[in-house]
Image (cartoon, helix red, strand yellow):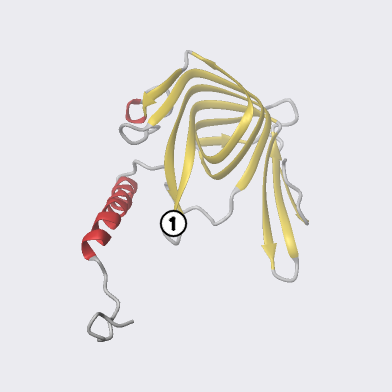
């Protein structure tokens, strides 16, 4: 391309416009990086590149908190999640599944089940970093729209960033729990009747 005098024009960057567009993005990324370094975000470890599914016939929890946050993987990608934190939880007929695709072999499913023999799975200081969650839920003494940095009913450390939306309750009950997640953390996790199964093909909890 030539200018009005017929001279060739090389590519130019409009730096002022670039700065106006780029600075907010850089600032947001920097804020997330700082928050992650300070432990304000969900991830306490680099998550794998695979989500997994969790189901349960029922979940009963004391000390419930939920807020938005971000996990990170080994490549440094930021992954938005909804953190569900519960002080004491009981789950009946827990199922966890993940499907991995391997070259030549194809899909391989890993399934873990527990809590199906009359003794529920029990967890304390449970943190679930999910991208999807469903079921029939009931809350007692619920507070919806609370600032995430002021949450005080969940486990220690169950707080998000200031000015972000959050909710909490004294007790939560969920029937037919269905969840897709990046990570689960717990202080203790007791799995009665634990069974692990690996099979070819897709065999997921739901």
Where is residue 71 shown, x and y percent of the image?
A: 45, 48
- Quarter of the image for the C terminus: give it: top right
Where is residue 146 shown, x and y percent of the image?
A: 38, 23
Q: Which of 21 and 85 is in front in this view?
A: 21
Which residue is at a point 73% across and 60% down the rendered structure image?
107
Q: How many labels does the image show?
A: 1
Res 194 visible: no
Q: How crowded is mark 1: few (under 14 residues within 10 Å), some or many (20 or more)?
A: few
Please identify the residue farthest to the front as the structure is shown. Answer: 4
Which residue is at a point 48% across and 24% down the rendered structure image?
64
Residue 154 placement, left or right of 113: left
Where is residue 76 shown, x and y percent of the image?
A: 41, 58
Please identify the residue farthest to the right as the structure is shown. Answer: 200
Residue 194 placement, left or right of 19: right
Q: Which of 62 and 104 is in front in this view?
A: 104
Q: Nearer the viewer, residue 19 or 62?
A: 19
Label 1: state its secondary structure: loop
Where is residue 72 shown, x and y percent of the image?
A: 44, 52
Residue 34 placement, left or right of 189: left
Res 109 visible: yes
Residue 152 placement, left or right of 182: left
Please identify the residue farthest to the bottom as the structure is shown. Answer: 7
**Looking at the image, residue 22 lies above or below residue 14:** above
Q: Nearer the viewer, residue 7 or 196?
A: 7
Which residue is at a point 69% across and 32% down the rendered structure image?
115
Which residue is at a point 70% across and 51% down the rendered structure image?
110
**Looking at the image, residue 18 lies above or below residue 130:** below
Which residue is under mark 1?
77
- Quarter of the image for the N terminus: give it: bottom left
Q: Name the quadrant containing residue 57.
A: top right
């Amino acid at each position: 391309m030539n200018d009005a005098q017929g001279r060739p024009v090389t590519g130019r960057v409009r730096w002022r416009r670039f700065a106006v567009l780029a600075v907010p993005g850089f600032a947001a990324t920097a804020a997330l990086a700082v928050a992650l370094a300070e432990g304000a975000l969900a991830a306490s470890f680099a998550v794998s590149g695979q989500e997994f599914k969790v189901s349960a016939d029922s979940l009963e929890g004391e000390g419930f908190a939920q807020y938005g946050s971000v996990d990170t993987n080994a490549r440094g990608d930021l992954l938005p999640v909804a953190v569900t934190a519960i002080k004491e939880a009981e789950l009946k007929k827990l199922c966890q599944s993940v499907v991995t695709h391997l070259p030549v072999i194809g899909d391989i499913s890993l399934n873990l089940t527990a809590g199906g023999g009359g003794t529920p799975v029990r967890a304390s200081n449970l943190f679930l970093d999910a991208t999807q969650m469903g079921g029939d839920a009931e809350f007692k003494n619920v507070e919806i729209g609370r600032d995430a940095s002021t949450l005080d009913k969940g486990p220690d450390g169950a707080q998000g960033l200031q000015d972000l939306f959050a909710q909490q309750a004294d007790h939560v009950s969920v029937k037919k729990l269905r969840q897709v997640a990046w990570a689960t953390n717990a202080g203790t996790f007791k799995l009665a009747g634990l069974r692990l199964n690996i099979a070819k093909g897709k065999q997921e909890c739901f």
